[in-house]
Amino acid sequence: ALQPVLVVKTKEVEELITVLDRESAEAAITKERCSKDEAAAKLEADKTNEMKSSCEADLAEALPALDAAVSALKSLTKGDITEMKSMKNPPKGVKLVMEGVCIMLDIKPEKVQSEDGKGKVNDYWKPSQKLLGDSLFMQKLLDYDKDNILPSIIGQIKSYIANPDFQPSIIEKQSKAATGLCKWVRAMEAMLAEKQAALKLVLDKIAELEANFKAANDEKESLADQVEKCEQKLVRAGKLISGLGGERTRWTENVASLGEEFTNVTGDVLVSSAIVAYLGVFSSSYRDDYIADAITNVKEKGIPGSAAVRLEKVLGNPVQIRDWNLQGLPRDSLSIDNAIIMSKSRRWPLMIDPQGQANKWIRNMEKEKQLGVFKLSQSDFIRNLETCVQYGRPVLIENVGETIDSILEPLLTKATYKSGGSLVINIGDSAVEYHEDFKLFLTSKLPNPHYAPEVSTKVVLINFTITPLGLQDQLLGITVEVERSDLEQERQRLVIQNAGFKKQLAQIEDKILKMLSEAGGDILEDEELINTLSASKVTSNEIGVALEAAEKTEAVIEETRMKYTPYPERGSLLFFCIAEMRNIEPMYQYSLDWFINLYIASMKGSVKEGEPAPEVEERVGILIDHFSFSLYVNVCRSLFEKD
């Protein structure tokens, strides 16, 4: 039902608007907090700069030690170096210093036999002697890249710096040159330690600040996105309420009528099914009597149902019925019921159509699908029929008698079967591929045919014999078309326009309900749905205005048309009078086409040139008199002389 969907979705939108208002307020608070976080981040940056300055000051304190070490190196003479190199069994402190120097210069030790004879140990003295013999040794120390010391060297030298014997005060007792080199190693390590500490402190703080800044910036961007989404949702919510609200009145009215129809649907469908199954062949009066009895029986059995059942209301589609009318189906209730019976039945229709009304309608309805119109007497009938069955073209077989050719038996019973993966049916001796779009219509011009019972099990018999009311409506249209062509053209235009509008409204309604039923949890996130509703709302309003104007115009036209009603009433009465003459003499049969041509000729022949046009009432009287006399003359001319 439409109303529950509308109520639920409207409630959801109202709840979402409440959430959006709350989120907007929270967003404002979050924005203020972000501003405070940015200020705090700036304060932290200032503190970091201060820390950096402090580290630089600490580094400056280490520079004098470096200068002292460089001075000590420069004070060494070549003789001091040569003295160290010439030591056969250097003191422990000297060897310790040279190990540190070799490590700083990334010189690898040699493997020598340990004093206890168990395995080999690292020996730096021989590499140290080679190093001390290098003429560029002192220059290498002075040019040492203290800013890019390898991590492996840093790890090894720390243990020497921590050794209590690796102190200049202890080493100077053993060698002047070793003392200067000890100061140099310790100065390099001190510079490195200071730089590493300062760098680590600054880097850690910068990383913290960057993380804080990123978090604050991400929150700020998230807030901006939330604010933008909230604004978009508010706009969409307004569109959604406007789009659904416009349909509320119409849907509420529909719900009220649908509620009653839902209660009565069981009994109404039961009676309607009986009409489709059994009443197609009977006249209008017999159908009315049967329906009245059926409704009484349904009520007696306690089945809920309507007081009056109309097939057009229960199984009919107003838009489709309008299309049928535009294609030539007479507008009386019997003809409309016949069309519904034909569309709902599983069997192919055999239409009793002495006046050719159904034939004309079928031709117009199926014209665009390349309708094939054949008679059983045609020599190429079978070949043409096979072609239509194979390619899915509809077929109309005219002038069917009281018996049906057996060659049509498989088609009437839809005796298809599978062969080679295709759907096949036998027509005569041939197996023809059966297209699912194929349709079959049969018409008979016999006014009161007698069909064997087995025929009714193969086809649905439908009585399209014209009714007085149906003929009257057709003659009224012809009358207005001749007398007031402007009114009839406008009426036909409005009929087509209104049919299109109502079809479009039904499509819009189906699309809205489909999208609402398929929408996720937050329908305001579905921009396509909102835009569709807005566009549908505009289209619906335009159609509503156009329909209202069309209904007013149609009412004026209908009022004018009704003034001509007495003339088609007389015409309908006279046609059925002369139709009964066949009971006197079988040769006295007058076709509807002949009658209508005479009807039109009488209107044109009753106009007197040069005279002013009379009032409608006076003109109708002239038409009745003129046509009555014209028909009398033509019928008398066709009568047989009797002895």
Image (cartoon, rainbow, N blue to C red):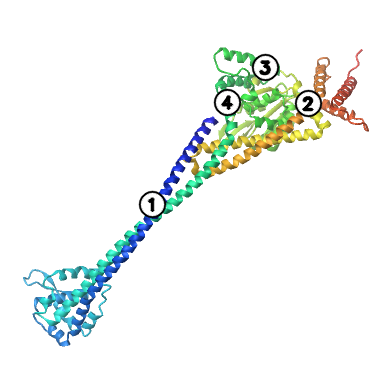
What residue type is disc 3 on?
Answer: Asp
**Quadrant housing residue 276:** top right
Does the residue at mark 4 contact the one at mark 3 (Cβ under 8 Å)? no
- Residue at image location 45% in from the left, 41% down from the top: 19
The residue at 80%/17% (across/down) is: 580
**Which sits earlier in the primary sequence, circle 3 or circle 2?**
3
> Circle 4 sits on which residue?
256
The amino acid beneath tag 1 is: Arg
Residue, disc 3: 288
Marks 1 and 2, the one that precedes in the sequence: 1
Q: Secondary structure at mark 2?
A: helix
What distance separates the C-alpha of mark 3 from that of mark 2? 26 Å
Identify the image quadrant of the C terminus: top right
Pick the front one: 640 or 536: 536
- Give me the residue at 67% from left, 30% from top: 321
Instruction: Judge by depth and name the residue closer to the eye, 190 or 290.
Output: 190
How far is mark 1 from mark 4, CA to CA? Answer: 54 Å
Helix, strand or loop for disc 1: helix
Q: Which residue is mark 2?
A: 562
Q: Are marks 2 and 4 in contact (CB under 8 Å)?
A: no
Label 1 – label 3 distance at C-alpha:
80 Å
Give SS at disc 3: helix
- Closer to the observer: label 4 or label 3? 4
Residue nearer the viewer, 59 or 531: 59
Task: Kindly identify the amino acid type of the residue bearing the numbered disc 4.
Answer: Ala
Label 1 belongs to which residue? 33
Neighbour class for label 4 at 10 Å: few (<14), some, many (≥20)?
few
Q: Report the mark closest to the observer, 1 or 4.
A: 1
